[in-house]
Image: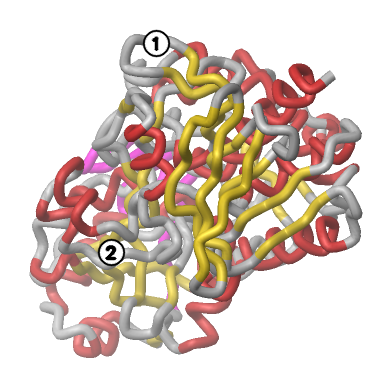
Amino acid sequence: MTDDALPLVIVGGGAAGMIAAINASISGQPAIILEKNVRVGCNAEFSGGLIQGSGTRFQEQAGVTDSPEQHFADLQRQNRGESDPAIVELVARRSADAVHLLADEAGLALHLDQSVLYSGHSTYRMHSMASETGQELVQGIRARIRNDENIDFVDNAEVTDIVPNGSSLDVLVSMSGQQEVIPARNVILASNGFGANREMVRKYIGEAIAALPYWGSENSDGRGILIGMGLGAGTAYMTAYEGHSHLNPKYGTRMGGALPALGSILVDASGRRFASEATTNSGFSKFMIPLPGSQAVEIYDERIHRAAMTNGAYEEASEMGAVKQFEDLETLAAAFDLPVDAVADEVRKYNAAAGSERDELDRAARGRIPFAPPYYAASVSAGVIHTQGGLTVDTSCRVLTTNAEVIPGLYATGGVAAGISGTGVDTYLPGNGLTHAFTTGLVASEHVASVLV
């Protein structure tokens, strides 16, 4: 190890990297964050800002009963038991700690979102800022970091490689066109997944998915994963990704994933529903991909519209004009070039199923409130938000080789690490991305602090 090696270098200034730096500072350790490009944004900023947390004080204050065990069961049910159960258990068990650290140490005004019970969750466990946007969340954390003398946040610092040097790691960084070497005793990879790398998406997930609109940060180019692989790291769940079924490419907005949970329906160009909307936002996208342009029309009423306006992403889509209001179904159908008889028939059947156990597409209907005018609708598309596969890690987030041996000093978090969402797209549970990022960032920094003592 070189004498001038820094104790901790964090590659990436998103959710995982920022919480790792804050926790390192709390532990009395200095940290440097190397961020490729703040102006491009991180995936946390592109998110809905929803963080799963089980057994939090916010749930207790709201009278919501939850536990890491219940959380773990929900995650495993959604991912069909395909993810590493040790990592899934870790995320569920430490999720409350991450939420509390963000509230207490980062000073975030978090609240428990009880406006929507998101598909796949057995109780309310989503925590967010007032606006329910990733932008507000990230801005709050970065404000905390700017005022921390133990944290050095370096923008326009693109990490190109990591080279072992004795018992330390040399981090190769391109800054202002110059290549620099930063020796480090420990490196936390927190530069997210490979959603912006079309070649990697095509290789690991498929041509059809690579052709879909990508709705994440262009910084998520897979570099962290490729660096780890170059050091002998193993990978897992590389086909996993979060899809989205409520994008509005024409307006540059997305409508969030709350609408189906509130009762919306989606129809194809024939004016007919084509799948049960009871599945997750990510999972439903697989039913939209085969449609022309991967597009559908989402239909609901004013009650649902008003309820959805508490979500920042939906509010923005509405303000930008993606959401249209109609006094009757005839006008609605004409606006989207849909057969009015088919649309009217789907709404009639939807209303008729209210109070029954399940409708004809096996969607739960008990407690359903029939649609009433005025109606609302939007053209929506399927797309990709971020990838969920990555480097294999242990429960301290240390990177493991293909032979399951620890690579000394190297950690992977968030989208760089193999996630908790199984394989494919329908195993992703709402909130998995941010929750996995914050908890793994916390755990990695804790282990670094323990070895630096």
Q: Which picture quadrant has residue 362?
A: top left
Q: Nearer the viewer, residue 264 or 60?
A: 60
Compared to residue 202, the image places residue 1 above or below, namely above
Asked if the magenta segment contains residue 430, the reply would be no
Q: Is the magenta stretch mostly helix, strand or loop?
A: loop
Dot 1 falls on a residue whose secondary structure is: loop
Question: In the image, is residue 369 part of the stretch drawn in magenta?
Answer: yes
Figure check: 27 above or below 170: above
Which amino acid lies under the numbered mark 1 shown in the image of this protein? Ala
Report the front residue among 17 and 226: 226
Task: Report, in whole angstroms, how far the alpha carbon at label 2 lies from the one at label 1.
Answer: 54 Å
Residue 246 image point, x, y percent: 36, 64
Label disc, if present, on residue 347 of the rendered structure: 2
* Residue range of the region highlighted in magenta in the rendering: 352-373
92 sits left or right of 322 in the view: right
**Residue at point 31%, 64% (across, down):** 214
Query: Which residue appears at 14% of the width and 79% of the height?
Result: 338
| Residue wearing tag 1 | 404
Residue sitting at x 78%, y 25%:
449
Q: Percent from the top left, x then y, of residue 10?
A: 63, 44
- Residue 298 visible somewhere in the drawing: yes
The first of marks 2 and 1 along the sequence is 2
Q: Is residue 136 above or below residue 99?
A: below
> Where is residue 42 shown, x and y percent of the image?
54, 61
Q: What residue type is labelled 2?
A: Val
State left or right for residue 414 relative to residue 213.
right
